Amino acid sequence: MNKINRKVVRTEDLNFWQKLYIPEILKGMKITIRQMFLPKFTRQYPEEKWIPPPSFRGRPVLVEENGKERCVACGLCSRVCPALAIEVQAAETELSKERYPVKFEINMLRCIFCGLCEEACPEEAIVMSKDYELTFFSQEEAIFGKDKLLMPIDELKDRLEFLRKYR
Amino acid sequence: MVKIQIDGKEYQAEPTKTIIEVARDNGIHIPHFCWHPRLSVSGNCRMCLVEVEKNPKLVIACATKVADGMIVHTANERVIKAREAIMEFLLINHPLDCPICDEAGECKLQDYAYKYSKGYSRFEEEKVRKPKRVALGPNVMLDVERCIMCSRCIRFCNEIAKTPQLVFTKRGDHVELTTAPGEELNNPYSMNVIELCPVGALTSRDFRFKARVWEMSSTESICRGCARGCNINIWVRNNEILRLTPRYNPEVNDYWMCDYGRLNTFKYVNSGDRIKSPMINKEGELIEVSWEEAIASAVFKLKNFKKSEIAGISSAFATNEDNYIFAKFIKQVLGSSNIDFMKHNVGNDDNLLIRADKTPNSLGTIAVGAIPGEKGMNFDQILNGIKSGTIKCLYVLCDDIAISDEIINALSKIDCLIVNSPIRNNLTSIADIVFPSATYAEKNGTFTNFQGRVQRIRPAVATAEIDRTLDGLAQSRLDKFGAPNDRWTKGVKIDARPTWRIIVAIANAMNHKFKYNSAEEIFNEISTNIDAFKNLNYMKIGNKGALLNIKLIKYYKPVTV
């Protein structure tokens, strides 16, 4: 075996004051003490909620407009979903959009919040909301149907505006 | 023969052929919408424009006959530019309906828009609005906006179905496809226009919005609607058949199939009428029991009768393999030669596909010998035997023979009635033992059509004992990547078995060694034992079928009662 001879070159040695150690401790303490008087970043979470910016990708929701989902059940979100979280079943409606999702389910245990569904949607019907609170007690509960997915368009204005501006 | 050059390569061609045909024969794809190999040339879509040297203008490949020394370019700069222009014209008034269009995913216009168009639109004006959701007939839905006026459907009705029911009205970009006032598109082959339509203008009313095409798996199979045995694809999602489409086979059905076969031959597979478990009649009521119990009970009953008191009804709905095993069981195990099948004829043969014989395998049933032969009783004799009490035990293969009060009355008198059936029907309600048998879409096997062509059927739907992955069934993306706890992998699986397996199990329980593990093994035995099937095997049958030697089939002369 060849022995690798590599000389360790230290660019800078500790100087006298650094070797003394105590001044360095004091430097650190200075930062710590300063933080005590600066504004706090922590919050009392469950009572004090964080409102994310519009660019935040929370759980995907279906846009509800005039009491109806915008979705036409084209299935592109379901096709593009890398985690196979979305299941859509179309049916016919009298509305001019011709078809609607009679069933729209997202398995929130599968969802990875990537936002590809939102990107693929030709109708701007599925968007990422600001909702990040997801808890369930069973696998069945984690499958969100239309009842949990529909969200009035007023609550999604931020995100829709963001999408139009930056997408 | 003439010599022509396409894209720098020389080809021999018959002078009667057009450029598009010669190119197609040699594996060169020239994009086209209105041209179809079985329809007259219309030449209106202009998509197949190609350059022929020494010709000042581009020519349409579908209507230009080849000539000696012709030099054709199918993909040079000039042609590509022309194609892009044609695509741009076609897309001007085509609505952005892909998300709600059933054709999306198998749409020629969609595919060509990717391959041959520029990818953006320069058109800023209003698109022409036309009627949407027009029910053109009982089975076909029309969206006039999506139509690109290729006239394939019109030519199909005129030339193939021979029922001129469709026509264009108005002019220019206002052209509308329609039927005559008060008329509808209702010929027996009307649904073929759905596949013919290169866009989503004509779609199926039955399949409407049921699934996106990419969500389904497709399996090559044979239609069970009549003795023609049209080649089909079975489209399945979540273990449920959603549609059938014709599969090209020039020897049998060409590109077509009839509406009856397309709509009425698969729905029973996923219906609520399916028998979910073997059943035994206990005190007038059918009670679900285990397979072992039902088989033991069948063996116990069958042993009680003399050979001459037993008869079997084979089935022209069952496969060659099923009928062969059944005949072997009746003749060798039970020692009876009373075996025959019921004929189901409705109407007359027509000039295109439809046959009067509404069963897929009557010729095969005869060919494998599931018929009486010299000394056995035929169907009418068996029926009379039941009435007179000489036949006391009847085994009926997958066929609802209880079609008249006369037969039901006769059968209800019988001591022992064993039935293999996929669904509940009149016959199973009066049976003593019922075995749930797999449908044609759940098993391997072969049908022999009226021409003597032996064709393969393959499992498209999984039964309780089949695993889609391990047993090599066609899989959709969801089938491949789904986990067992996903809802969309939980389609209903029926606990049914192929008929041959049920018979083999009973024969083995009666101490006869029937050693078969697959339908293919049975077919190999058929080809060794029966002259007409000589030299055939599953490999040779392939996906286009193979003819058996029809002259060697041993028919029987029905004895008049």
Image (cartoon, grey):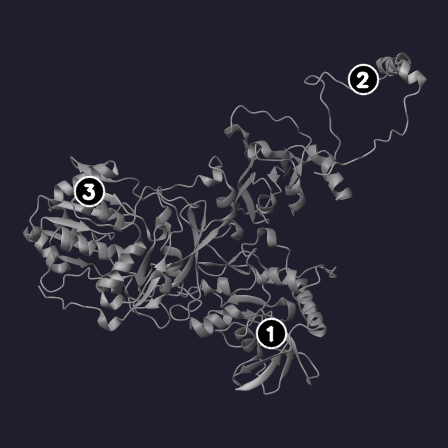
Residue B461 image point, x, y percent: 39, 48
Distance from Cα at disc 1 to Cα at disc 3: 62 Å
Chain of the residue on which disc 1 is drawn: B
- The nearer-to-camera label among 1 and 3 is 3
At horizontal 15% and vertical 53% (from top left) the residue drawn is: B330
Counting other residues with Cα less than 10 Å from the Cα at mark 3, is it few (<14), some (14-19), or many (20 or more)?
many
Kindly identify the amino acid type of the residue bearing the numbered disc 3.
Ile
Query: Do discs 2 and 1 belong to a common subunit?
Result: no
Residue behind mark 3 = B433
Residue B247 image point, x, y percent: 44, 63
At horizontal 69% and vertical 31% (from top left) the residue drawn is: A130
Left or right: B427 in relation to B93: left
Quadrant of the rendering where the C terminus of chain B is positioned: bottom left
Seen in the picture, residue A137 relative to B248 is either above or below; the reply is above
Distance from Cα at disc 2 to Cα at disc 1: 73 Å
Residue behind mark 2 = A40
Residue behind mark 1 = B44
- The nearer-to-camera label among 2 and 1 is 2
